[in-house]
Amino acid sequence: MEKLVELEILGLSSNHSQSGSFTLVMGEVEGSRRLPIVIGMFEAQAIAIEIEKIVPNRPMTHDLFKSFANSFNYEIDKIVISDMKEGVFYAKIKCHNESSEIEIDARPSDAIAIAIRFDSPVFCSEKVMSEASIEFSEEENKEENLTKKPAAQKVRSKKDGSLKDFSLDKLNMMLDKAISNEDYEKAARIRDEINKRN
């Protein structure tokens, strides 16, 4: 059986080389390697709102998957980033119910968004880690820990400064509007500004 490496989410940031995409940085739980995965805006938003615990007014696709799985008593055992071909990652969602165990093919971004909702561990095959990960030295690790921010905070744009100009009432109105427009990235920024003042 192939060796698996457990990963955790370290950060999410906009990708400067591909507009409209984000880089999800996964870190080795018991090690210093990092696995950067380029993901789309929708998947980045799905991961960020679950990390930030923002409740959308309608279920997103990954929430729908969770409801569907729960309805049939399926539990997610783990997510495995299983392969990489020509720079494209492949993943599997391993799950079970009382009567069967199944494996579902998925994009890593969707699989990770689902893993967060089920509180399931994420693994990567050693083969993929050795091909695609970046090694961090002790010095870089110390430096990163000093500057590390919560994952979804790195999704924010540079417009944060302007939120300081609004009153608390106005911010609460803006938060409601952002949630009803399903702009969860903006909602997270506004919520953080409100929390700073409380």
Image (cartoon, helix red, strand yellow):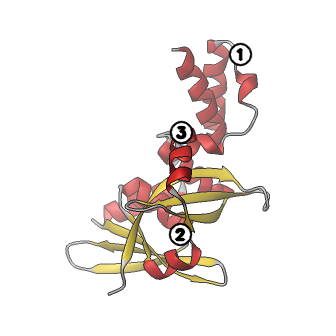
Considering only order in the chain, which callout, 3 or 2, is on the residue closer to the N terminus? 2
- Residue at the image position 59 percent from the left and 58 percent from the top: 24
Q: Which secondary structure, mark 1?
A: loop
Residue 117, image x, y percentages = 41, 54
- Residue at the image position 64 percent from the left and 58 percent from the top: 23
Disc 2 designates what residue?
108
Mark 2 vs mark 3, CA separation in Å = 28 Å
Q: Which secondary structure, mark 3?
A: helix
Q: Are marks 2 and 3 in contact (CB under 8 Å)?
A: no
Q: Amino acid at mark 2?
A: Pro
Residue 155, image x, y percentages = 64, 45
- Residue at the image position 47 percent from the left and 61 percent from the top: 32
Q: Are marks 2 and 1 in contact (CB under 8 Å)?
A: no
Disc 1 designates what residue?
166
Q: Which secondary structure, mark 2?
A: helix
Residue 19, image x, y percentages = 79, 58
Q: Residues within 10 Å of mark 2 (few under 14, many from 20)?
A: many
- Residue at the limit of the structure toward the front, as seen here: 139
Considering only order in the chain, which callout, 3 or 1, is on the residue closer to the N terminus? 3
Q: Is residue 77 left or right of residue 84?
A: left
For residue 146, which numbered disc appears in the image?
Answer: 3
- Residue at the limit of the structure toward the left, as seen here: 98
Q: Amino acid at mark 1?
A: Phe
Q: Amino acid at mark 3?
A: Leu
Q: Is residue 152 left or right of residue 15?
A: left
